Image (spheres, rainbow, N blue to C red):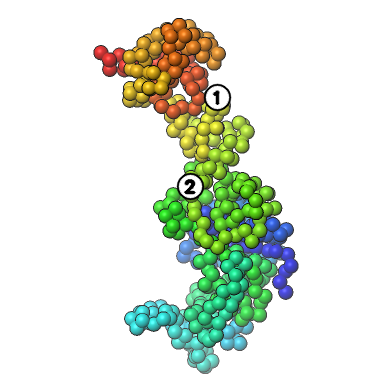
């Protein structure tokens, strides 16, 4: 009997990085379980040994930990239904297949790869509606089978899928779906190396682990009948199916690397916060009942319902993701912001002090949407590059090359005698502007450009002078003035 408690599973293959499509699936599996007070199980599907990537299992653990999707059972923490790694369950799969072989629901297939290729080539050449295995070995006699097994012939075990009639199932999102049985190939259950196929292992494991809801992408809608046939062949209860809409890029095609960062690792490297990623992925194919857009994981657990899952494809929009990320960056305390962004400060100046980081962070936090913007915004801290002197020209501030030359020349002396704090620096500039009947901007703008070489900086003139310190500021003013003097000769 199916367990009354909702149990979902995330069953990734250890083949590399965590793609955001897989992470979205894991999130929805987690939410389906937790919104109903159920269990979320992690299972590692490593039956395809050729695609196994060393270290990928650790990346799966890290991804779930970083995003807060804590599993209740799994290879690393155990549980009542282990082992939770498919390669450790080979004997279970070999034993489970025996009843199907005995009752004719599965059969040995001895066809070579060359024959299978030849059959498909002939089917395509003849314009056949069905492209796939022709069931050549389905009706071999028991004597023929035993003879081939005794000779050591290589084989796979296939499922004998009904060839007539229809199969209908109800998906929790897409409703009732019907398919002709004649369109399905007799799928391989056990491969020649003794490992189970993805479909077969899933059915065995999902039943053994009392999984009640299968959550996956809607590309599996048409292959789900094969799973159901297998459940029924074993006499297992069929779980509920929840198929999620595809994730497309802005161009309407399936999300891929050409649309930008597509793995969790890439997004984290680009300066996105886990909380923002989780919140945004939850909205890719699901809508809450109200107008709320920002959700913590705990809030998602309470608000989530399967009824909110959409049928149409979701569009992955990095601009929207940045919008979410900006919200979460600005929610951080200053200390939290400095802690998570420290590596980006040190990219610019490996010797940067904690005090300088704090000064910069106070003005940066409200000006960025992702952490990787930090190095560009504070590039001036690593040194003054020979910028285009036309940056000193600013119509609104009434700053020209000539006015800048005068201001920089005067302030080399003024700042030399100015106490180095915000109030004193600002007063020196404001008093100078007033005495010379200038706009404050006519004074402050060229000084900021002269010491940073950047049109946009975190904070105004007073702040950047404070960041750099008196000695470095005067040194840079002199350098920019020398360049300006040469230009205006």
Q: Quadrant of the N terminus?
A: bottom right
Q: Is residue 15 above or below residue 138?
A: above
Q: How many marks?
A: 2
Left or right relative to 147: residue 388: left
| Front one among 251 and 368 | 251
Q: CA distance from mark 2 to mark 1?
A: 30 Å
> Regarding mark 2 in the picture, which secondary structure is present there?
helix
The residue under the point 35% across, 21% down is 393
| Quarter of the picture holding the C terminus | top left
In percent of width and height, residue 389 lies at 33, 22
Q: Is residue 180 visible?
A: yes
Does residue 257 appear in the picture of this structure? no
Q: Residue 447, image x and y in percent?
A: 42, 17
Residue 321, above or below 471 = below
The numbered mark at residue 318 is 2
At 52% from the left and 50% from the top, the residue drawn is 264
């Amino acid at each position: 009997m199916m367990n009354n408690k909702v149990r979902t599973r995330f069953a990734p293959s250890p083949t590399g990085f965590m793609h955001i499509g897989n992470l979205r699936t894991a999130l929805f599996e987690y939410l389906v379980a937790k919104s109903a007070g159920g269990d979320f199980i992690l299972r590692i599907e490593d039956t395809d040994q050729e695609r196994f990537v060393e270290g990928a299992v650790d990346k799966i653990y890290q991804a779930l930990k970083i995003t807060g999707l804590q599993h209740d059972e799994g290879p690393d923490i155990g549980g009542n239904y282990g082992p939770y790694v498919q390669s450790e369950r080979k004997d279970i799969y070999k034993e489970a297949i025996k009843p199907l072989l005995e009752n004719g629901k599965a059969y040995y297939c001895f066809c070579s790869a060359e024959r299978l290729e030849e059959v498909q080539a002939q089917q395509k050449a003849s314009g056949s509606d069905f492209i796939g295995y022709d069931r050549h070995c389905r009706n071999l006699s028991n004597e023929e089978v035993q003879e081939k097994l005794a000779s050591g012939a290589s084989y796979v075990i296939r499922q004998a899928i009904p060839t007539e009639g229809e199969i209908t199932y109800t998906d929790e999102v897409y409703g009732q779906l019907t398919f002709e049985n004649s369109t399905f190939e007799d799928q391989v259950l056990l491969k020649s190396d003794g490992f189970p196929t993805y479909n077969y292992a899933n059915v065995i494991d999902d039943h053994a682990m009392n999984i009640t809801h299968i959550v996956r992408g809607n590309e599996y809608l048409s292959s789900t009948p094969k799973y159901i046939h297998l459940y029924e062949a074993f006499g297992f209860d069929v779980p509920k199916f929840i198929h999620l809409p595809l994730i497309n890029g802005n161009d309407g095609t399936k999300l891929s690397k050409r649309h930008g960062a597509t793995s969790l690792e890439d997004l984290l490297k680009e300066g996105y916060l886990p909380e923002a990623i989780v919140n945004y992925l939850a909205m890719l194919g699901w809508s809450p009942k109200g107008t709320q857009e920002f959700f913590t994981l705990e809030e998602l657990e309470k608000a989530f319902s399967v009824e909110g899952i959409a049928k149409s494809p979701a569009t992955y929009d990095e601009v929207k993701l940045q919008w979410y990320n900006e919200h979460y960056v600005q929610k951080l305390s200053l200390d939290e912001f400095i802690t998570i962004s420290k590596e980006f400060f040190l990219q610019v100046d490996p010797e940067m002090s904690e005090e300088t980081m704090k000064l910069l962070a106070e003005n940066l936090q409200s000006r960025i949407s992702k952490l990787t913007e930090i190095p560009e915004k504070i590039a001036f801290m690593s040194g003054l590059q020979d910028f285009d002197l036309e940056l000193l020209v600013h119509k609104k501030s009434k700053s020209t090359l000539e006015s800048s030359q005068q201001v920089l020349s005067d302030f080399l002396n003024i700042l030399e005698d100015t106490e180095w704090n915000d109030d004193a620096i600002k007063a020196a500039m404001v008093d100078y502007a007033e005495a010379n009947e200038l706009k404050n901007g006519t004074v402050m703008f060229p000084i900021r450009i002269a010491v940073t070489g950047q049109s946009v900086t975190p904070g105004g003139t007073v702040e950047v002078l404070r960041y750099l310190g008196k000695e470095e500021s005067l040194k840079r003013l002199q350098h920019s003035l020398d360049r300006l003097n040469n230009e205006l000769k």
